[in-house]
Amino acid sequence: MKKQLFINGEWLDAKEYTTLIAPYSEEKLAEIAAASPEDVDAAIDAADRARAQWAKTPAHARAEILENLSNLIEERFDETARIISLEAAKPIEMAKTEVARTIQTFKFAAEEAKRIHGETIPLDAAPGGERRVAYTVREPIGIIGAITPFNFPLNLVAHKVGPAIAAGNTIVLKPATQTPLSALHLAQLTQEAGLPVGVLNVVTGRGSVVGDRLVTDDRISMITFTGSPSVGIGIRNKAGLKKVTLELGSNAAVIIDKGTDIDKIIPRCIIGAYSNQGQVCISLQRAYVHESLYEEFVAKFIEASNNLKLGDPLEPATDVSALISKNDVQRALNWIEEAKSAGAVVATGGEAQGNMLRPTVILEADPQMKVSCQEVFAPIVLINKISSVDEAIDLVNDSRYGLQAGIYTKDVDVALDAVEKLQVGGVLINDIPTFRVDHMPYGGVKESGTGREGLKYAVEEMTEMKLVIWNRN
Ligand code: NAP
């Protein structure tokens, strides 16, 4: 199967193609067009030509297209989940959850399209401002370059395409090389949903070629990027005066205070740690457990980890499948080895089975070990003993990242204190950090990024404010 570029509503050949391989079965899935810089230019041209007309399209019409898109995904639910599962090795039940969330994301986008507005400003609050009427309007920002990662190949594309369409922008999208099929499937559905040609263009190919061209072209007004901190920082350095939002990685943590019901939270912690093989930006990587509960938590967490079923992502019973690449399996094993030789205890897991890594629990890891201070992006969890929540907060904050953090506590003062002190974009009280619904503001501080997604917040990022003043003097 050959997958072409989607430019100006047409499916176009590229000069080169690369073979897409399924991470679990290693079967060949498709031949994917590798766009040249000229192909990217053609996509930007198309987005540029579509821009003026699309920006004038009424809100109700933009909302209707988004609503149609949401409905079409619902109609093609199983097919869509299968595409995600095959190209990303995402266990099928989780792929279905991603499809369900994408349906929501486009519904929220349709709703947001109808409430983009500014505000009135009381200019007479300043001497000299008398008898002037002022208000702001929000205008589309222009052409958006969207660059997306492999781990939620549909919903994270939706988090860029949805608000961009809602706000009246045109888009050139570059999906991750390992997961282009979900994005191309979505492009097909946008056509069926009635999106005018040129509003969405999808160019597949290498990040260093396609991504770079998007980031450096002057006609693109904004880059919205989700991916790793190193690539994100590189983009920021090259983007000049373009607006840039960066949704980057993390080594998310949960704090478990004394008095917590361990049996109740173990299933949540297991989901947080191992969903999608730990390849989630808010995956639970570090657990800081009060000394009074540490032994119980460790024993029960290990038992639950060992009960997980490894295997084919298309099998409904599979909990954990292949990592996205062999390199990532090797990287995870190297980091585990480094931790072990520096004195940490690998309490379970620590081995690969084909391209899968067995769920791995590491105890007594120092904060400077790679498994602790970098983003593992694999089914690896560290459990550490703490004697107070304050100590745990310092350990959570001792990180380059700050996306979300969770704390389980029965003490209101402790919870409020944690909210104040944790250096993250979102604090979850009595939950793991691994929680997201699609309309909430989502994003991080420090090397976890800048800007927020979540439909209302992304629309804000994707529009420019214009001030209007009427002089009645
Ligand atoms: P990645 O390697 O940074 O890739 C992300 C995207 O950037 C891909 O489309 C990639 O293309 C492209 N890219 C690579 N080099 C580029 C360059 N020089 N210029 C422009 N674009 C370039 O990340 P990933 O491995 O796909 O995804 C995992 C990362 O995403 C993790 O760090 C995770 O935490 C983060 N993430 C963050 C969030 C959030 O909302 N905060 C959500 C999900 C994931 P190629 O595929 O062709 O290399």
Image (cartoon, rainbow, N blue to C red):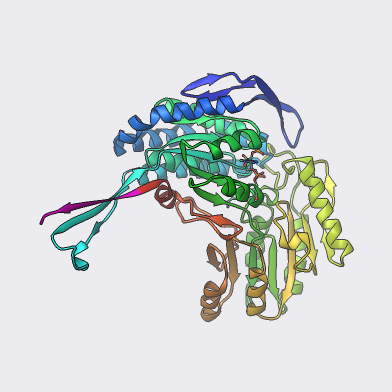
Examine the image and state in which quarter residue 156 appears: top right
Can residue 82 be seen here? The reply is no
Q: Residue furthest front?
A: 128
Identify the residue at image location x=45%, y=26%. Answer: 46
Identify the residue at image location x=59%, y=71%. Answer: 408
Examine the image and state in which quarter residue 380 appears: bottom right
Identify the residue at image location x=59%, y=65%. Answer: 405
Q: Main secondary structure of the magenta part?
A: strand
341 horizontally vs 457: left or right: right
Q: If the image is split into quadrants, where does the C terminus sit?
A: bottom left
Q: Nearer the viewer, residue 379 or 459?
A: 459
- From the top left corner, tell me how far across and down residue 93 is, in percent: 62, 43
- From the top left corner, tell me how far across and down residue 461 is, in percent: 43, 50
Can you say whether 418 is above or below 381 in the image? below
Q: Nearer the viewer, residue 320 or 451?
A: 451
- From the top left corner, tell me how far across and down residue 131 is, in percent: 13, 60
Q: Nearer the viewer, residue 417 or 394?
A: 394
Q: Is residue 467 magenta?
A: yes
Q: Nearer the viewer, residue 233 or 225?
A: 233
Q: Which residues are magenta?
A: 465-473
Can you say whether 404 is above or below 10 in the image? below
Can residue 428 be seen here? The reply is yes
Q: Residue furthest left?
A: 473
Q: If the image is split into quadrants, where does the N terminus sit?
A: top right
Examine the image and state in which quarter residue 216 appears: top right
Q: Quadrant of ligand 1?
A: top right
Q: Is residue 381 magenta?
A: no
